[in-house]
Amino acid sequence: MSTADSNSYRFDSSEAGADVSQQIRDISEVPAIEVITTAAVHLMSAAAVKLGLAAEDNAAELKDLDEARKLITALAGLVTAAAPEIGSQHAGPLRDGLRSLQLAFREESLIPDAPGKGPGEKYTGAVS
């Protein structure tokens, strides 16, 4: 039989406070461009998986076009809004990746969206 002490956890706020302070110091050292591009790459990767483009054997099982649409739209908004701030050197590759995902979505859709109505196209314009 176990005792209450051996199965309980006591939260030590001083440990948590030190950990949060360290994380804040760490993130403060990261340039904004890196945070933006990292977020964009995460959105791209997630969208690719939801489009069934993962390299895994079960890629088809992971496909979810509704989720992919949301991720691509969020990516389009981020890339469009951030482009003037991060410059063409960083925005160009992000735009290329976004366009590839938009085209892949169009190919995967059983009922194609009208031009300009696909995921993220309200931010990027029609993709064909």
Image: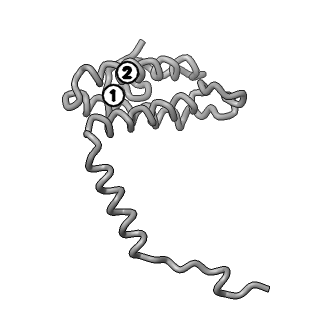
Tell me which residue sits at (26%, 39%) in the image: 31
In the rendered view of the protein, which quadrant contains the C terminus?
Answer: top left
Q: Is residue 36 left or right of residue 107?
A: left
Q: Position of residue 4 (x, y in %)?
A: 67, 87
At label 1, counting other C-alpha atoms closer than 10 Å, the crowd grade (few under 14, some 14-19, many 20 or more) is few
Q: Is residue 47 left or right of residue 64?
A: left
The residue sitting at the right extreme is 1
The residue sitting at the left extreme is 84
Q: Position of residue 68 (x, y in %)?
A: 51, 33
In the rendered view of the protein, which quadrant contains the N terminus?
Answer: bottom right
Label 2: which residue? 116
Q: Disc 1 residue type?
A: Lys
- Determine which of the numbered discs, if any, sits on residue 122 in the image: 1
Tell whether label 2 touches label 1 (CB within 8 Å): yes
Q: Position of residue 13 (x, y in %)?
A: 41, 76
**In the image, is residue 96 above or below residue 13?**
above
